Image (cartoon, grey):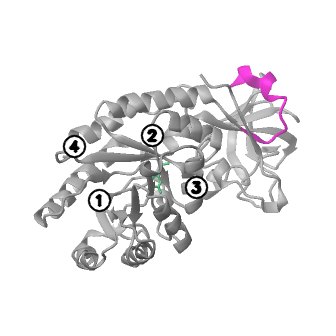
Amino acid sequence: MKELVNKLQDYKTPFYWYDLQLLEKTLSIIKKESDNYGFNVHYALKANANLPILKIIKEYGFGADCVSGNEVLRSLEAGFSSTEIVFAGVGKSDEEITIGLENDILSFNVESVPELEVINELAHKLNKKAKVAFRLNPNVDASTHHYITTGLEENKFGINMRDMDGVLAILKQLKNIELTGIHFHIGSQITDMKVYEKLCYRVNEIQEWFNTRNIHLAHINVGGGLGINYNAPEKDSIPDFKTYFKVFADYLKLQPKQQLHFELGRSVVGQCGSLITKVLYVKNGTKTKFAIVDAGITELIRPALYQAFHTIENLSSERLEETYDVVGPICESSDFFRKGILLPETKRHDLIAIRSAGAYGEVMASRYNLRNIAKAYYSDSL
Ligand SMILES: *Cc1c(COP(=O)(O)O)cnc(C)c1O
């Protein structure tokens, strides 16, 4: 990123910087590798919902994966087709469900029986038939940070298979529901492909279960979760989508005409974004030097929320390296980006890039301490 320092100098810090060329390269690889097998990809808006980014993603023909009514509306605004929108979430409000129904979305990914009953009731009022997929708990451990593991039975997400006979009995009574598929999402930042292999085996077993009950499912949706390399944003800027899709092609047994859907978030946008911040002060501590920067948990909460690692670069300095704690200005001890890292000698007004901030960065911004929301700037696209 060093080559950009003169350009980046012009903007008021902190700000988000998006490399749209990298985004497009990533999208064209996803398109090629998923088309290879006829797989359907939905982009998970919750990773980054900026309109310029959504408009580019839409151009590649992907659908949208939403977890709120406002995300459904935003994806429509960006031009995604309503028939390619899937809508998940354990706590959909009546208002949000109505947005989905009025727009005839592809699927509500339903996470509980009470939710199913409410969707049925609201669909009845609108004289519609809601298409739903059950979000199931495959009980597969994603081997990732425990805050972003979602496919275990003890998680709040999804329905457990042992309750499924009861769910089907209730489903029979619900005239305004059409079951079209099953859905899984086992966690995020998954880098071990064995985890996806296990998910495939489990999905095959679950499919068998439905088959023996004569239920045909038009869609299987295996969610998202593919990880990115936070250690090497430059060298490893595009995740290995080839291997990822191949795992599903090799291990998941699809039935004739059955469609396989994916919901990718982080792996699409994670590496194309950086948080750019300026050093306000360098302060000597008892053990270390603090580089106090003008961005904090209000712009990027991932390190505080999940002990996440981000590569940090000083774009302004070529001086000899020293050890620093890179910390923000917010009145919380958890407001730091990294501790004890080597950076070229750092001075007031140096420009710092916190890399791999394209996913779950800007979308989680807050106004804590009454700070202003940081702006986003974009490189030219391809
Ligand atoms: C968050 C989420 C995704 C996207 O996850 P990534 O790890 O960003 O790929 C997909 N599906 C659902 C249901 C989600 O909640």
| Tally of numbered tags | 4
Residue 65 forms part of the magenta stretch? no
Instruction: Find residue 380 and report its horizontal and vertical position in percent.
Output: 67, 25
Q: Which structural element holds mark 2? A: loop
Find disc 2 in the rendering and name its residue. 62
Find disc 4 in the rendering and name its residue. 251
Question: Label 1 is placed on what type of residue?
Answer: Thr
Q: Are marks 4 and 1 in contact (CB under 8 Å)?
A: no
Question: Label 2 is placed on what type of residue?
Answer: Phe
Find disc 3 in the rendering and name its residue. 73
Marks 1 and 2, the one that precedes in the sequence: 2
Marks 4 and 2, the one that precedes in the sequence: 2
Q: Residue at x 39, y 58 (%)?
A: 107
Residue occupying the far left of the picture: 212
The region drawn magenta spans: 1-16
Q: Which structural element holds mark 4? A: helix
Q: Residue at x 42, y 68 (%)?
A: 155
Q: Distance between the Cα atoms at labels 1 and 2?
A: 20 Å
Instruction: Find residue 14 and report its horizontal and vertical position in percent.
Output: 79, 42
> Could you tell whether 145 is left or right of 302 in the image?
left
Q: Nearer the viewer, mark 3 or mark 4?
A: 3
Find disc 1 in the rendering and name its residue. 180
> Could you tell whether 104 is left or right of 167 in the image?
right
Residue density around tag 2, few if under 14, some if 14–19, many if 20 or more, within 10 Å: many
Marks 3 and 4, the one that precedes in the sequence: 3
Q: Which structural element holds mark 3? A: helix
Q: Nearer the viewer, mark 4 or mark 1?
A: 1
Residue density around tag 3, few if under 14, some if 14–19, many if 20 or more, within 10 Å: some
Q: Report if the beta carbon of the residue with label 2 is closer than 8 angstroms to ligand 1.
A: no
Q: From where the camera sits, is residue 336 visible? A: yes
Marks 1 and 3, the one that precedes in the sequence: 3
**Quadrant including the C terminus:** top right
